[in-house]
Amino acid sequence: MENLKNIAPIEDFNWDAYESGDAVTNVSKEELEKAYDSTLNKVNDREVVDGTVIAMNKREVVVNIGYKSDGIIPLSEFRYNPDLKVGDTVEVYIENQEDKKGQLILSHKKARATRSWDRVNAALENEEIIKGYIKCRTKGGMIVDVFGIEAFLPGSQIDVKPIRDYDVFVGKTMEFKVVKINQEFKNVVVSHKALIEAELEQQKKEIISKLEKGQVLEGTVKNITSYGVFIDLGGVDGLIHITDLSWGRVSDPREVVSLDQKLNVVILDFDDEKKRIALGLKQLTPHPWDSLDPNLKVGDHVKGKVVVMADYGAFIEIAPGVEGLIHVSEMSWSQHLRSAQDFMKVGDEIEAVILTLDREERKMSLGIKQLKADPWETIEEKYPVGSKHTAKVRNFTNFGVFVEIEEGVDGLIHISDLSWTKKIKHPSEFTQIGADIEVQVLEIDKENRRLSLGHKQLEENPWDVFETVFTVGSIHEGTIIEMLDKGAVVALPYGVEGFATPKHLVKEDGSQAQLDEKLEFKVIEFNKDAKRIILSHSRIFEDAAKAEEKAEKKATKKSSKKEEAPMIQNQAASTTLGDIDALAALKEQLEGKK
């Protein structure tokens, strides 16, 4: 209170000016304004300056640039920097020093865009680590806001491990490294993976330096491919090849493991230089062959599932990791070349007989035909010589037809045993593959597992009859059915064929007989064993001419004999008469003497 008592009022204070709002000092208003302005920064519109964050809330950031008023910027312009706090220095773009309300209008986004290109280029040149805000997904990667520029983050550059869900990165602020800039199109490519690769490389070197073959480690399934599984061993990756996942066959690694699964693996091999690590999973369990029933032996029956098919055979899994091969030749007693797919398919459950068993080599061969009796063991009883059967045509050759009477029992019908009468050039003229044909067993070759069969033997040999019909010299009507260089094939009655050479095809008028022409033919040769009939058309009129000529000669000779006979008789008669006259004269003379 004593201090207040000592304060004296200003004698020349202008109370009227004070009430009107005017300055009430001895200093002029202009001087005051000049003094105040000297304490403020000089700024210009459309200029980028640095400011200090003095306050912020959920929507706005208040920035002081040393001007007479502070600027307010939406917080959304700082979303790339979630660590923004009061006291931080930020760059701002002055859009307007004073709007209608006297408010300073600032923009952080425009300030970043103005300086961004220079900063991005500097970041690439200096390998600087920068922050960016992941705005959204795009084809092949993400769009990142870097200094206000939309940069591209390839999916492969997000992390060192494959990304399964890109959406979880949208809205995140992360550190990046500028890896590429296209100056012409103003395109920027950034990478987050590049920041951690160097660190990982060092980690890999340390981990690999401590690895040993046979060492068991825990890992996490990082990626699954068609050929194997990649395991994260804690900073370094290893590969379990599909063949090392299980002792049994695996068609898809997903049958054994799943993503993010933790499991123990054993190191099979590694390469210090290429940093490749080969891992195994099946090696942690005993080999199935070692636990195979010790009493199992050749001849035993086993059951299993077909796991692999090939043309030459099928692999049967009788236990996980224990397989046997059934060769196609052990699938049927038949000797026909067939594919294993004709007998079974993958997934079939079958029973088989053990043919060979090698526990050291871990190999086993199986057979299924052994489940049935070998038909050739009793071939003489079931198919004796002379017995008749129905067979199926399986194949043709130039010399005959291969047929199958039953599975495993094959036979050959020689082309000459197909027909008694027809001259067959190829079996396809007589029958077709897959057709049934009646056969008779002619001969058994047990050693070579082959029967000699006949088809024509089912009928009587018509050549026994033909021998009495087509006798040499007999004439028959025939039709020329085929013309050859050496002559013509002639169809005769009863379905038999004959052959005539060109000189026997000359007709009476001197012309040559033609195809499909019907003529009379004379048999000039008949060979029952060779089934050959030689014919001649020319011989018919030639023989007729000869016969006629012979008849004429005979008639001429006979007539000449008739003419000679009277002369002889007359002579005889004259001689006789003369003798009579002489005798008469002699008689008269004798009588006169008397």
Image (spheres, rainbow, N blue to C red):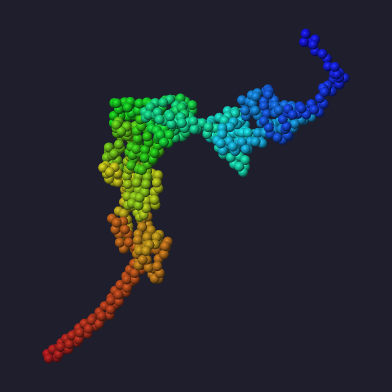
Nearest to the observer: residue 431 or residue 204: 204
Answer with left or right where residue 508 lies relative to residue 53: left
Quadrant where the image shows the C terminus? bottom left
| Image x and y of residue 356, in percent | 29, 33
Residue at the (31%, 51%) spot, across then down: 461
Location of residue 489 by image quarter: bottom left
Q: Is residue 488 above or below residue 62?
A: below
| Image x and y of residue 440, in percent | 31, 45
Q: Is residue 145 above or below residue 504?
A: above
Location of residue 151 by image quarter: top right
Quadrant where the image shows the N terminus? top right
Q: Is residue 304 above or below residue 547?
A: above
Is residue 408 visible from the viewing direction of this image? yes
Answer with left or right where residue 17 lies relative to residue 446: right
| Image x and y of residue 221, in percent | 47, 28
| Image x and y of residue 4, in percent | 79, 10
Residue at the (29%, 26%) spot, across then down: 294
Q: How many marks overall? A: 0
Residue extending furthest toward the bottom: 593
Q: Is residue 58 above or below residue 468?
A: above
